[in-house]
């Protein structure tokens, strides 16, 4: 799967930016999308949005040795989701959200969970993602609000990488070579157990009250290359979540985490 968001839609953490190197120049989003299609000439499909976003997916089972995991692409009420992996508790979540089990897959469930967060706050975003049991990576794009929401499960079994393209766009993909080739040195693994929102930034849903520290990465040539993000388990910040009908998902995100 591949998601690209221009700067007016989402800003990646500044730590992903690495000094430019003549040996690894980042590419523009159009080039990255073309390379994704060239790598999967038959199975890949994509859609672009006027607001500066593009989503792409490969139909069928996932590669990279992850047999049994699927890539999914779904859209509902102008909310779109690319999903890779599986949810072990999909049936119970379908009942929890009052959905039709015959027509609901993991991607549609994530859209419904996102829509619940957006429209029915206050409910901590970290708790909603924590309720998803399994191995997964997903990216949600809300075409109405322009919001981006991405998350990666805590087990680290599903690969996910992100980086910054030549024009500053955020690139998120499960294929390392696509991100590395498209973002040069400004790429890194997406941190496990974390979620990213275009307004709230990067948070840990496993340890929502702790800080995320960015540690610099160095490649085999000794050159700075993006950053790895780890939870500082020794840092605690006391916070009091908002209550009341005025609370929305964005506000809950800001208060419930860092």
Image (spheres, rainbow, N blue to C red):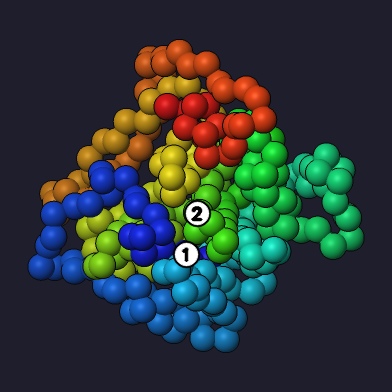
Is 238 drawn above or below residue 38 in the view shown?
above
Is 201 drawn above or below residue 172 in the view shown?
above
Seen from the viewer's position, the closer of residues 78 and 81 is 78
Q: Nearer the viewer, mark 2 or mark 1?
A: 2
Q: Is residue 1 visible?
A: yes
Disc assigned to residue 3: 1
Circles 2 and 1, Cβ within 8 Å, touching? The answer is: yes
Q: Which residue is mark 2?
A: 148
Residue in view at x 47 percent, y 32 percent: 254
Residue found at the far bottom of this picture: 42
| Residue 187, position as x, y percentages in the image | 30, 55
Residue 80, quarter of the rendered image: bottom right
Q: Secondary structure at mark 1?
A: strand
The reply, left or right, for residue 221 in relation to residue 112 is: left
Residue in view at x 22 percent, y 40 percent: 216
The reply, left or right, for residue 81 in relation to residue 169 is: right
| Residue 50, position as x, y percentages in the image | 47, 74
Crowding at label 2, few (<14), some or many (≥20) Cα neighbours within 10 Å? many
Residue 166, quarter of the rendered image: bottom left
Residue in view at x 62 percent, y 22 percent: 243
Q: Quadrant of the C terminus?
A: top left
Residue in view at x 58 percent, y 73 percent: 58
Spatial CA span between label 2 and label 1: 10 Å
Seen from the viewer's position, the closer of residues 169 and 69 is 169
């Amino acid at each position: 799967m591949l998601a690209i968001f221009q700067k007016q839609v989402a800003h990646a953490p500044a730590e992903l930016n690495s000094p430019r190197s003549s040996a690894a120049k980042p590419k523009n989003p159009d080039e990255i999308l073309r390379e994704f299609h060239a790598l999967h000439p038959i199975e890949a499909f994509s859609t672009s949005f006027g607001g500066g976003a593009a989503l792409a997916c490969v139909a069928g089972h996932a590669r990279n040795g992850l047999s049994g995991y699927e890539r999914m692409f779904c859209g509902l009420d102008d909310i779109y989701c690319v999903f890779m992996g599986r949810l072990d508790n999909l049936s119970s979540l379908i009942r929890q959200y009052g959905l039709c089990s015959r027509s609901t897959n993991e991607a549609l469930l994530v859209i419904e969970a996102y829509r619940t967060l957006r429209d029915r706050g206050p409910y901590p975003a970290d708790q909603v993602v924590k309720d998803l049991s399994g191995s997964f990576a997903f990216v949600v794009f809300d075409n109405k609000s322009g919001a981006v929401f991405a998350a990666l499960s805590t087990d680290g079994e599903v690969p996910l990488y992100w980086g910054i393209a030549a024009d500053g766009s955020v690139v998120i993909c499960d294929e390392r070579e696509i991100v590395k080739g498209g973002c040069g040195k400004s790429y890194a693994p997406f941190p496990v157990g974390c979620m990213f929102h275009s307004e709230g930034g990067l948070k840990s849903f496993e340890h929502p009250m702790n800080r995320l520290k960015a540690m610099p990465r160095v490649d085999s040539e000794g050159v700075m290359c993006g950053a790895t993000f780890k939870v500082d388990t020794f840092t605690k910040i006391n916070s009091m979540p908002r209550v009341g009908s005025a609370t929305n998902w964005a506000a809950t995100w800001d208060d419930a985490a860092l």
